[in-house]
Amino acid sequence: MSSSERAAGESGRFQSAELSDGLVLLTEEIPGVRSASAGIWVRFGSAHEHREEMGVAHLLEHMVFKGTHQRSARDLALVLERLGGSLDAYTTREYTSYQARVLDTDLGTALEVLADLVLDPLLRDEDLELEREVVLEEIATVDDTPDDLVFDLHSEALWGEHPYGHTILGTRETITRLSGAELRRIHRGAYRRPNLVVAVAGSIRHEAVLEAVSRLIPGSGGPPTEGRPVPPPTPLAAREVTVARPSAQTHIVFGAPTFAHGDPRRYALVLLSNAFGGGMSSRLFQRVREELGLAYAVYSYQSFYREAGVTGVYVGTRPEWADKATAVIREELGRVAREGLTAEELDDVKGQVKGQMVLALESTGSRLQRLAGCALYQEPYLGLDTLVARVDAVTNDEVAALAAEYFDPDRQVLVRLGPGSER
Protein backbone atom coordinates (compact mmCIF):
# COMPACT_ATOMS: atom_id res chain seq x y z
CA MET A 1 0.00 0.00 0.00
CA SER A 2 1.30 3.43 -0.92
CA SER A 3 0.00 6.77 0.22
CA SER A 4 0.64 10.46 -0.23
CA GLU A 5 -0.45 13.64 1.46
CA ARG A 6 -0.59 17.27 0.44
CA ALA A 7 -1.70 20.35 2.32
CA ALA A 8 -3.96 22.26 -0.05
CA GLY A 9 -4.75 25.53 1.71
CA GLU A 10 -8.35 26.53 1.10
CA SER A 11 -9.05 23.06 -0.28
CA GLY A 12 -8.51 21.29 3.03
CA ARG A 13 -6.06 18.43 3.44
CA PHE A 14 -5.84 16.00 0.53
CA GLN A 15 -4.51 12.48 0.95
CA SER A 16 -4.45 9.45 -1.30
CA ALA A 17 -3.58 5.79 -0.97
CA GLU A 18 -3.22 2.98 -3.47
CA LEU A 19 -4.19 -0.27 -1.81
CA SER A 20 -3.35 -3.76 -2.99
CA ASP A 21 -4.88 -4.89 -6.30
CA GLY A 22 -4.95 -1.30 -7.59
CA LEU A 23 -7.82 0.10 -5.51
CA VAL A 24 -7.39 3.89 -5.21
CA LEU A 25 -8.61 5.92 -2.22
CA LEU A 26 -8.67 9.72 -2.13
CA THR A 27 -9.81 11.84 0.80
CA GLU A 28 -10.09 15.53 1.61
CA GLU A 29 -10.50 16.65 5.19
CA ILE A 30 -12.50 19.90 5.15
CA PRO A 31 -12.57 21.96 8.34
CA GLY A 32 -15.73 23.72 9.41
CA VAL A 33 -18.33 21.29 8.01
CA ARG A 34 -20.41 18.63 9.76
CA SER A 35 -21.15 16.49 6.73
CA ALA A 36 -19.31 13.97 4.59
CA SER A 37 -19.74 12.89 0.98
CA ALA A 38 -18.50 9.48 -0.11
CA GLY A 39 -18.52 7.62 -3.40
CA ILE A 40 -17.36 4.53 -5.23
CA TRP A 41 -16.59 4.86 -8.94
CA VAL A 42 -16.45 1.82 -11.22
CA ARG A 43 -14.37 2.26 -14.36
CA PHE A 44 -17.12 0.91 -16.58
CA GLY A 45 -19.54 3.05 -18.58
CA SER A 46 -21.33 3.13 -21.91
CA ALA A 47 -18.09 3.55 -23.87
CA HIS A 48 -16.96 0.11 -22.66
CA GLU A 49 -20.05 -1.64 -24.03
CA HIS A 50 -20.45 -3.49 -27.29
CA ARG A 51 -23.14 -1.93 -29.46
CA GLU A 52 -25.46 -4.93 -29.10
CA GLU A 53 -25.38 -4.57 -25.27
CA MET A 54 -25.78 -0.79 -25.25
CA GLY A 55 -27.24 0.38 -21.94
CA VAL A 56 -25.96 -2.53 -19.84
CA ALA A 57 -23.85 -0.28 -17.57
CA HIS A 58 -26.84 1.92 -16.79
CA LEU A 59 -29.21 -1.03 -16.31
CA LEU A 60 -26.70 -2.63 -13.94
CA GLU A 61 -26.54 0.62 -11.96
CA HIS A 62 -30.32 0.36 -11.52
CA MET A 63 -30.25 -3.31 -10.62
CA VAL A 64 -27.84 -3.07 -7.69
CA PHE A 65 -30.47 -1.00 -5.85
CA LYS A 66 -32.93 -3.93 -5.99
CA GLY A 67 -31.27 -5.53 -2.99
CA THR A 68 -28.11 -7.18 -1.70
CA HIS A 69 -27.50 -10.33 0.30
CA GLN A 70 -27.63 -8.19 3.46
CA ARG A 71 -30.24 -5.52 2.65
CA SER A 72 -33.52 -5.43 0.80
CA ALA A 73 -34.31 -2.67 -1.70
CA ARG A 74 -36.36 -0.93 0.99
CA ASP A 75 -33.53 -1.23 3.51
CA LEU A 76 -31.12 0.38 1.02
CA ALA A 77 -33.54 3.26 0.53
CA LEU A 78 -34.24 3.67 4.24
CA VAL A 79 -30.91 3.20 5.97
CA LEU A 80 -29.43 6.59 5.06
CA GLU A 81 -32.67 8.52 4.60
CA ARG A 82 -33.69 7.82 8.21
CA LEU A 83 -30.40 9.54 9.17
CA GLY A 84 -31.14 12.58 7.00
CA GLY A 85 -28.66 11.42 4.37
CA SER A 86 -28.99 10.52 0.71
CA LEU A 87 -27.91 7.75 -1.65
CA ASP A 88 -27.66 8.15 -5.41
CA ALA A 89 -25.96 6.84 -8.53
CA TYR A 90 -25.40 7.72 -12.18
CA THR A 91 -23.76 6.31 -15.28
CA THR A 92 -21.55 8.18 -17.74
CA ARG A 93 -19.67 7.21 -20.86
CA GLU A 94 -16.56 6.26 -18.91
CA TYR A 95 -17.63 5.23 -15.41
CA THR A 96 -20.50 4.44 -13.06
CA SER A 97 -20.72 6.32 -9.76
CA TYR A 98 -22.43 5.47 -6.46
CA GLN A 99 -22.53 8.27 -3.87
CA ALA A 100 -23.83 9.08 -0.42
CA ARG A 101 -24.00 12.25 1.65
CA VAL A 102 -24.46 12.04 5.42
CA LEU A 103 -23.63 13.70 8.72
CA ASP A 104 -20.01 13.08 9.64
CA THR A 105 -21.09 10.79 12.49
CA ASP A 106 -22.79 8.49 9.97
CA LEU A 107 -19.93 8.12 7.50
CA GLY A 108 -19.19 4.56 8.61
CA THR A 109 -22.75 3.53 7.79
CA ALA A 110 -22.57 5.25 4.40
CA LEU A 111 -19.38 3.40 3.48
CA GLU A 112 -20.90 0.09 4.55
CA VAL A 113 -23.98 0.69 2.39
CA LEU A 114 -21.93 1.78 -0.63
CA ALA A 115 -19.65 -1.26 -0.42
CA ASP A 116 -22.63 -3.60 0.03
CA LEU A 117 -24.44 -2.02 -2.92
CA VAL A 118 -21.47 -2.17 -5.29
CA LEU A 119 -19.96 -5.52 -4.35
CA ASP A 120 -22.83 -7.78 -3.24
CA PRO A 121 -26.04 -7.12 -5.20
CA LEU A 122 -28.51 -9.97 -5.75
CA LEU A 123 -29.12 -9.28 -9.47
CA ARG A 124 -32.13 -11.59 -9.58
CA ASP A 125 -33.93 -12.35 -12.85
CA GLU A 126 -37.30 -11.52 -11.30
CA ASP A 127 -36.05 -8.05 -10.34
CA LEU A 128 -34.69 -7.51 -13.84
CA GLU A 129 -38.11 -7.91 -15.42
CA LEU A 130 -39.45 -5.06 -13.26
CA GLU A 131 -36.40 -2.77 -13.53
CA ARG A 132 -36.22 -3.29 -17.30
CA GLU A 133 -39.62 -1.58 -17.50
CA VAL A 134 -38.34 1.31 -15.36
CA VAL A 135 -35.42 1.88 -17.75
CA LEU A 136 -37.71 1.62 -20.77
CA GLU A 137 -39.81 4.37 -19.16
CA GLU A 138 -36.63 6.42 -18.70
CA ILE A 139 -35.84 5.98 -22.41
CA ALA A 140 -39.39 7.04 -23.24
CA THR A 141 -38.97 10.12 -21.05
CA VAL A 142 -35.90 11.17 -23.05
CA ASP A 143 -37.78 10.51 -26.28
CA ASP A 144 -40.42 12.95 -25.01
CA THR A 145 -37.77 15.49 -23.92
CA PRO A 146 -36.30 16.78 -27.17
CA ASP A 147 -33.74 19.07 -25.52
CA ASP A 148 -32.22 15.88 -24.02
CA LEU A 149 -32.73 13.65 -27.05
CA VAL A 150 -30.98 16.05 -29.40
CA PHE A 151 -27.69 15.58 -27.51
CA ASP A 152 -27.89 11.79 -27.93
CA LEU A 153 -28.54 12.31 -31.64
CA HIS A 154 -25.61 14.69 -31.85
CA SER A 155 -23.22 12.27 -30.14
CA GLU A 156 -24.18 9.60 -32.66
CA ALA A 157 -23.75 12.03 -35.54
CA LEU A 158 -20.37 13.22 -34.23
CA TRP A 159 -18.79 9.90 -33.20
CA GLY A 160 -20.59 7.41 -35.44
CA GLU A 161 -19.87 3.76 -34.57
CA HIS A 162 -17.31 4.71 -31.91
CA PRO A 163 -18.48 3.94 -28.34
CA TYR A 164 -18.64 7.67 -27.54
CA GLY A 165 -21.61 7.66 -29.89
CA HIS A 166 -23.52 5.16 -27.74
CA THR A 167 -26.55 6.36 -25.84
CA ILE A 168 -25.97 5.83 -22.11
CA LEU A 169 -29.51 4.58 -21.53
CA GLY A 170 -29.37 2.09 -24.39
CA THR A 171 -32.21 1.55 -26.85
CA ARG A 172 -35.54 -0.21 -26.48
CA GLU A 173 -34.12 -3.10 -28.49
CA THR A 174 -30.91 -3.57 -26.50
CA ILE A 175 -32.56 -3.17 -23.11
CA THR A 176 -35.28 -5.65 -24.04
CA ARG A 177 -32.66 -8.22 -25.07
CA LEU A 178 -30.35 -7.96 -22.05
CA SER A 179 -30.53 -10.94 -19.68
CA GLY A 180 -29.80 -11.44 -16.01
CA ALA A 181 -26.88 -13.67 -16.95
CA GLU A 182 -25.30 -10.82 -18.95
CA LEU A 183 -25.71 -8.38 -16.04
CA ARG A 184 -24.13 -10.87 -13.63
CA ARG A 185 -21.26 -11.44 -16.07
CA ILE A 186 -20.59 -7.70 -16.38
CA HIS A 187 -20.76 -7.28 -12.61
CA ARG A 188 -18.33 -10.13 -11.94
CA GLY A 189 -15.90 -8.85 -14.54
CA ALA A 190 -16.05 -5.07 -14.02
CA TYR A 191 -16.98 -4.49 -10.35
CA ARG A 192 -13.60 -5.63 -9.04
CA ARG A 193 -11.18 -3.94 -6.71
CA PRO A 194 -8.63 -2.93 -9.41
CA ASN A 195 -11.45 -1.18 -11.27
CA LEU A 196 -12.67 0.89 -8.29
CA VAL A 197 -11.97 4.41 -7.07
CA VAL A 198 -13.17 5.47 -3.61
CA ALA A 199 -13.35 9.14 -2.64
CA VAL A 200 -14.50 10.80 0.58
CA ALA A 201 -14.67 14.52 1.40
CA GLY A 202 -15.86 16.48 4.43
CA SER A 203 -15.49 16.19 8.20
CA ILE A 204 -13.44 13.00 8.11
CA ARG A 205 -10.17 11.38 9.19
CA HIS A 206 -8.15 9.77 6.42
CA GLU A 207 -6.84 6.98 8.64
CA ALA A 208 -10.35 5.94 9.71
CA VAL A 209 -11.58 5.96 6.09
CA LEU A 210 -8.57 3.93 4.98
CA GLU A 211 -9.23 1.31 7.66
CA ALA A 212 -12.92 1.08 6.73
CA VAL A 213 -12.29 0.80 2.97
CA SER A 214 -9.59 -1.86 3.48
CA ARG A 215 -12.07 -3.89 5.53
CA LEU A 216 -15.19 -3.35 3.42
CA ILE A 217 -13.68 -3.87 -0.05
CA PRO A 218 -11.71 -7.15 -0.05
CA GLY A 219 -9.26 -8.34 -2.71
CA SER A 220 -10.74 -9.00 -6.12
CA GLY A 221 -9.11 -12.31 -7.01
CA GLY A 222 -7.74 -10.96 -10.28
CA PRO A 223 -7.86 -8.15 -12.81
CA PRO A 224 -11.10 -6.98 -14.44
CA THR A 225 -12.34 -9.17 -17.28
CA GLU A 226 -14.99 -6.75 -18.57
CA GLY A 227 -14.47 -3.29 -19.99
CA ARG A 228 -12.59 -3.05 -23.26
CA PRO A 229 -10.10 -0.19 -23.73
CA VAL A 230 -11.66 2.77 -25.50
CA PRO A 231 -9.73 3.60 -28.68
CA PRO A 232 -9.21 7.19 -29.84
CA PRO A 233 -12.19 8.13 -32.02
CA THR A 234 -12.17 9.26 -35.63
CA PRO A 235 -14.94 11.89 -35.73
CA LEU A 236 -17.22 12.02 -38.73
CA ALA A 237 -17.07 14.86 -41.24
CA ALA A 238 -18.80 18.18 -40.60
CA ARG A 239 -22.37 18.10 -41.87
CA GLU A 240 -25.97 18.91 -41.02
CA VAL A 241 -28.52 16.30 -39.97
CA THR A 242 -32.22 17.03 -39.54
CA VAL A 243 -34.46 14.61 -37.64
CA ALA A 244 -38.11 15.36 -38.30
CA ARG A 245 -40.69 15.10 -35.55
CA PRO A 246 -43.68 17.21 -34.51
CA SER A 247 -42.86 19.58 -31.66
CA ALA A 248 -43.39 23.18 -30.56
CA GLN A 249 -39.68 23.97 -30.92
CA THR A 250 -36.76 23.04 -33.10
CA HIS A 251 -33.78 21.94 -31.01
CA ILE A 252 -30.37 22.55 -32.55
CA VAL A 253 -26.91 21.40 -31.46
CA PHE A 254 -23.64 22.48 -33.06
CA GLY A 255 -20.51 20.60 -32.05
CA ALA A 256 -16.91 19.93 -33.01
CA PRO A 257 -14.50 17.29 -31.67
CA THR A 258 -11.72 18.53 -29.40
CA PHE A 259 -8.98 17.07 -27.24
CA ALA A 260 -9.00 14.74 -24.23
CA HIS A 261 -9.48 15.60 -20.56
CA GLY A 262 -5.75 15.58 -19.83
CA ASP A 263 -4.84 18.21 -22.41
CA PRO A 264 -3.56 21.40 -20.70
CA ARG A 265 -5.46 23.50 -23.26
CA ARG A 266 -8.63 22.53 -21.39
CA TYR A 267 -8.43 25.68 -19.26
CA ALA A 268 -8.30 27.97 -22.28
CA LEU A 269 -11.21 26.16 -23.96
CA VAL A 270 -13.37 26.44 -20.83
CA LEU A 271 -12.70 30.19 -20.74
CA LEU A 272 -13.50 30.55 -24.45
CA SER A 273 -16.71 28.55 -24.16
CA ASN A 274 -17.89 30.51 -21.12
CA ALA A 275 -17.26 33.85 -22.83
CA PHE A 276 -19.03 32.64 -25.95
CA GLY A 277 -22.14 31.16 -24.38
CA GLY A 278 -21.72 30.44 -20.69
CA GLY A 279 -23.91 33.04 -19.03
CA MET A 280 -26.19 36.04 -19.40
CA SER A 281 -23.29 38.30 -20.36
CA SER A 282 -21.98 35.90 -23.03
CA ARG A 283 -21.99 36.70 -26.73
CA LEU A 284 -24.64 34.13 -27.61
CA PHE A 285 -27.05 35.13 -24.86
CA GLN A 286 -26.75 38.80 -25.66
CA ARG A 287 -27.10 38.36 -29.44
CA VAL A 288 -29.55 35.48 -29.80
CA ARG A 289 -31.82 36.15 -26.83
CA GLU A 290 -31.45 39.76 -25.74
CA GLU A 291 -30.90 41.47 -29.09
CA LEU A 292 -32.94 39.25 -31.46
CA GLY A 293 -35.35 37.40 -29.15
CA LEU A 294 -34.87 34.15 -31.06
CA ALA A 295 -34.67 31.77 -28.09
CA TYR A 296 -35.27 31.32 -24.40
CA ALA A 297 -32.40 28.80 -23.99
CA VAL A 298 -29.08 29.22 -25.78
CA TYR A 299 -25.71 28.20 -24.40
CA SER A 300 -22.33 26.69 -25.19
CA TYR A 301 -20.96 23.53 -23.59
CA GLN A 302 -17.94 21.24 -23.52
CA SER A 303 -17.28 17.67 -22.42
CA PHE A 304 -13.91 16.01 -21.97
CA TYR A 305 -13.29 12.25 -22.04
CA ARG A 306 -10.12 10.18 -21.70
CA GLU A 307 -9.56 9.99 -25.47
CA ALA A 308 -11.31 13.06 -26.90
CA GLY A 309 -13.72 15.90 -26.19
CA VAL A 310 -16.45 18.00 -27.74
CA THR A 311 -17.35 21.67 -27.66
CA GLY A 312 -20.58 23.06 -29.00
CA VAL A 313 -23.73 25.16 -28.80
CA TYR A 314 -27.38 24.38 -28.04
CA VAL A 315 -30.39 26.50 -28.94
CA GLY A 316 -34.12 25.79 -28.76
CA THR A 317 -36.33 28.00 -30.90
CA ARG A 318 -39.71 28.01 -32.67
CA PRO A 319 -39.58 26.24 -36.05
CA GLU A 320 -40.17 29.46 -37.99
CA TRP A 321 -37.04 30.96 -36.41
CA ALA A 322 -34.81 27.88 -36.71
CA ASP A 323 -33.07 28.93 -39.93
CA LYS A 324 -32.42 32.44 -38.63
CA ALA A 325 -31.13 31.18 -35.27
CA THR A 326 -28.83 28.76 -37.08
CA ALA A 327 -27.49 31.52 -39.32
CA VAL A 328 -26.89 33.89 -36.40
CA ILE A 329 -25.00 31.24 -34.41
CA ARG A 330 -22.90 30.38 -37.47
CA GLU A 331 -22.14 34.07 -37.83
CA GLU A 332 -21.06 34.35 -34.18
CA LEU A 333 -18.96 31.19 -34.45
CA GLY A 334 -17.24 32.63 -37.51
CA ARG A 335 -16.58 35.93 -35.80
CA VAL A 336 -14.97 34.39 -32.72
CA ALA A 337 -13.01 31.96 -34.93
CA ARG A 338 -11.54 34.92 -36.85
CA GLU A 339 -11.06 37.37 -34.01
CA GLY A 340 -10.89 35.44 -30.75
CA LEU A 341 -11.87 37.31 -27.58
CA THR A 342 -11.13 40.89 -26.65
CA ALA A 343 -8.79 41.52 -23.73
CA GLU A 344 -11.74 42.76 -21.69
CA GLU A 345 -13.79 39.63 -22.44
CA LEU A 346 -10.92 37.39 -21.39
CA ASP A 347 -10.42 39.29 -18.14
CA ASP A 348 -14.15 39.14 -17.38
CA VAL A 349 -14.46 35.42 -18.05
CA LYS A 350 -11.39 34.65 -15.95
CA GLY A 351 -13.12 36.32 -13.02
CA GLN A 352 -16.30 34.38 -13.74
CA VAL A 353 -14.59 30.99 -13.87
CA LYS A 354 -12.44 31.64 -10.80
CA GLY A 355 -15.52 32.67 -8.87
CA GLN A 356 -17.31 29.50 -9.91
CA MET A 357 -14.38 27.40 -8.73
CA VAL A 358 -14.32 29.06 -5.31
CA LEU A 359 -18.09 28.73 -4.85
CA ALA A 360 -17.90 25.05 -5.79
CA LEU A 361 -15.46 24.49 -2.94
CA GLU A 362 -18.27 25.18 -0.49
CA SER A 363 -19.93 21.89 -1.53
CA THR A 364 -18.55 18.58 -0.29
CA GLY A 365 -20.23 16.98 -3.30
CA SER A 366 -18.27 19.15 -5.74
CA ARG A 367 -15.04 18.40 -3.92
CA LEU A 368 -15.88 14.71 -4.07
CA GLN A 369 -16.22 14.85 -7.86
CA ARG A 370 -12.91 16.69 -8.12
CA LEU A 371 -11.18 14.06 -6.01
CA ALA A 372 -12.49 11.16 -8.07
CA GLY A 373 -11.49 12.87 -11.30
CA CYS A 374 -7.84 12.77 -10.24
CA ALA A 375 -7.87 8.96 -10.25
CA LEU A 376 -10.28 8.45 -13.14
CA TYR A 377 -8.21 10.62 -15.47
CA GLN A 378 -4.85 9.90 -13.82
CA GLU A 379 -4.16 13.57 -13.13
CA PRO A 380 -2.56 15.23 -10.10
CA TYR A 381 -4.68 16.84 -7.42
CA LEU A 382 -4.49 20.61 -7.79
CA GLY A 383 -5.19 23.02 -4.96
CA LEU A 384 -7.21 26.18 -5.44
CA ASP A 385 -4.16 28.43 -5.78
CA THR A 386 -2.78 26.25 -8.58
CA LEU A 387 -6.10 26.15 -10.40
CA VAL A 388 -6.44 29.93 -10.20
CA ALA A 389 -2.89 30.33 -11.48
CA ARG A 390 -3.62 28.12 -14.48
CA VAL A 391 -6.70 30.15 -15.33
CA ASP A 392 -4.79 33.42 -14.96
CA ALA A 393 -1.98 32.09 -17.17
CA VAL A 394 -4.23 31.63 -20.22
CA THR A 395 -3.34 34.16 -22.92
CA ASN A 396 -5.34 35.77 -25.69
CA ASP A 397 -3.16 34.03 -28.27
CA GLU A 398 -4.01 30.61 -26.80
CA VAL A 399 -7.72 31.41 -26.84
CA ALA A 400 -7.53 32.72 -30.41
CA ALA A 401 -5.81 29.55 -31.60
CA LEU A 402 -8.51 27.35 -30.06
CA ALA A 403 -11.27 29.54 -31.46
CA ALA A 404 -9.82 29.30 -34.96
CA GLU A 405 -9.52 25.52 -34.74
CA TYR A 406 -12.68 24.45 -32.93
CA PHE A 407 -15.23 27.23 -33.44
CA ASP A 408 -14.90 27.40 -37.22
CA PRO A 409 -18.50 27.07 -38.47
CA ASP A 410 -17.31 24.86 -41.34
CA ARG A 411 -16.06 22.26 -38.81
CA GLN A 412 -19.36 21.82 -36.99
CA VAL A 413 -21.59 18.77 -36.94
CA LEU A 414 -25.08 20.24 -36.69
CA VAL A 415 -28.19 18.32 -35.64
CA ARG A 416 -31.70 19.77 -35.86
CA LEU A 417 -34.60 18.01 -34.14
CA GLY A 418 -38.09 19.28 -34.86
CA PRO A 419 -40.67 19.86 -37.59
CA GLY A 420 -39.41 19.60 -41.16
CA SER A 421 -38.28 17.09 -43.72
CA GLU A 422 -35.53 14.66 -42.77
CA ARG A 423 -32.21 15.16 -44.58
Image (tube, rainbow, N blue to C red):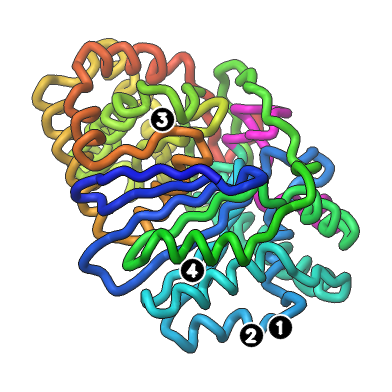
Q: CA distance from mark 3 to mark 4?
A: 42 Å
Q: Quadrant of residue 302?
A: top left
* Highlighted magenta segment, given as a residue range: 154-176
Mark 3 / mark 1, whichever is N-terminal: 1
Mark 2 touching mark 3, by CB under 8 A?
A: no
Q: Which residue is mark 1?
A: 72
Q: CA distance from mark 2 to mark 3?
A: 51 Å
Q: Please, what is the dominant secondary structure of the magenta stretch?
A: helix
Residue wearing tag 3 = 326
- Does label 3 or label 4 sit earlier along the sequence? 4
Secondary structure state at the residue bearing disc 1: loop
**Residue ID for mark 2:** 75
Mark 2: which amino acid? Answer: Asp
- Amino acid type, mark 3: Thr
Disc ID at residue 172: none
Q: Is residue 171 above or below residue 73?
A: above
Residue 76 placement: quadrant: bottom right
Residue at left 60%, top 33%?
Answer: 242
Disc 1 vs disc 2: Cβ atoms closer than 8 Å? yes
The amino acid type of the residue labelled 4 equals Ala
Name the residue nearer the viewer: 239 or 51. 51
Helix, strand or loop at disc 2? helix
